[in-house]
Image (tube, grey):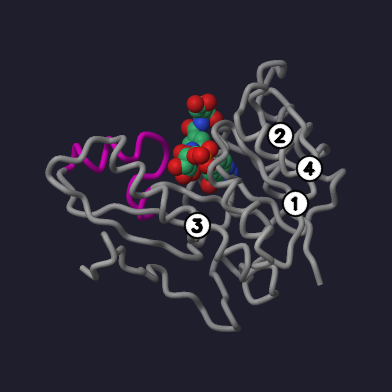
Amino acid sequence: MTIAIVVLISGRGSNLQSIIDAVGRGELPARIAAVISNEADALGLHRAQQAGIETRVLSHAGFADRNDYDLALRDLVSEFNPDLIVLAGFMRILGAQFVGRFEGRIMNIHPSLLPKYRGLNTHERALADGASNHGASVHFVTTNLDAGPIIVQSKVPIYADDSPEILAERVLQEEHRILPQAIRWFAEGRLSARDGRVLLDGETRPEQSLTSHRRHGIPN
Ligand code: NHR
Ligand code: GAR
């Protein structure tokens, strides 16, 4: 069985690329039915086209309110009959009209160790706090922003001389690993969201299932 995925993006699309590559290597029993961006100039749209994937742009700018955009996006996504919707650097908050339609079938990659640093500018905030580690989370999307049940996380160290950009790059490498991993579990029918919890192989997922980051191949 191959599942159909719709990927929502807003920009660079490196996480999208990690999915395209995993599908290309035969690691995901999935096909990307469409890539949809709310930004017309998103680099990720070119990545999709290169891979022969259908693209659509639905700009939020033309809509009077969030609800109208949600409805339009819901209808556009529905045209592709996806089994799973992946937010991969998608920068618009989605409301109940959208989320309700696809309950338990939307996942997001977020650049922090949730529940820490929901929302935006996570790397700056982790550095400002003097945190010693940071990371990325894949979670199911609910109407509570960045608060849906966590599927998988990966932790990276923060070093004294880190800039937000260097830290973002370290986190991004982990994103590119855990997002395809989570999609693979879903595509294999091993992963679901039930009653606000994540089930993997029939077992409740521990809320913080951390994998450790290795720098230059040396375990820390
Ligand atoms: N929607 C719901 N309902 N739940 C989530 O968990 C969502 C979501 C939509 C996007 C991604 C999220 C992230 O991983 C995400 C998770 C955008 C904003 C934001 O404030 C915050 C979090 C995330 C995405 N967006 C501004 C807005 O007004 C716009 C910012 C901009 O355009 O630059 O929507 O971080
Ligand atoms: C990624 O770091 C992703 O986690 C983050 O934006 C970047 C997108 O990169 N997502 C958010 O901040 C969502 N609000 P990409 O376009 O190269 O995948």
Which numbered tag is attached to residue 32? 1
- CB contact under 8 Å: marks 3 and 2: no
76 is within the stretch colored magenta: no
For marks 3 and 4 on the same chain, the one whose residue lies earlier in the sequence: 4
Q: Residue furthest left?
A: 160
Q: Residue at x 57, y 52 (%)?
A: 18
Residue 218 in view of the camera: yes
Q: Position of residue 105 (x, y in %)?
A: 69, 58
Q: Which residues are magenta?
A: 112-129
Q: Position of residue 166 (x, y in %)?
A: 28, 40
* Up/down of 39 relative to 104, above or below: above
Real-space Cα separation, disc 3 to disc 4, in angstroms: 26 Å
Left or right: residue 74 versus residue 41 is right
Left or right: residue 4 versus residue 178 is right
* SS category of the residue bearing label 1: strand
Name the residue beneath numbered marker 3: 138
Name the residue beneath numbered marker 2: 70
- Magenta span dominant secondary structure: loop
Which numbered tag is attached to residue 150? none
| Along the line of sight, the residue nearer the viewer: 4 or 205 | 4
* Disc number lying in front (3 or 2): 3
Real-space Cα separation, disc 3 to disc 2, in angstroms: 22 Å
* Disc number lying in front (1 or 4): 4
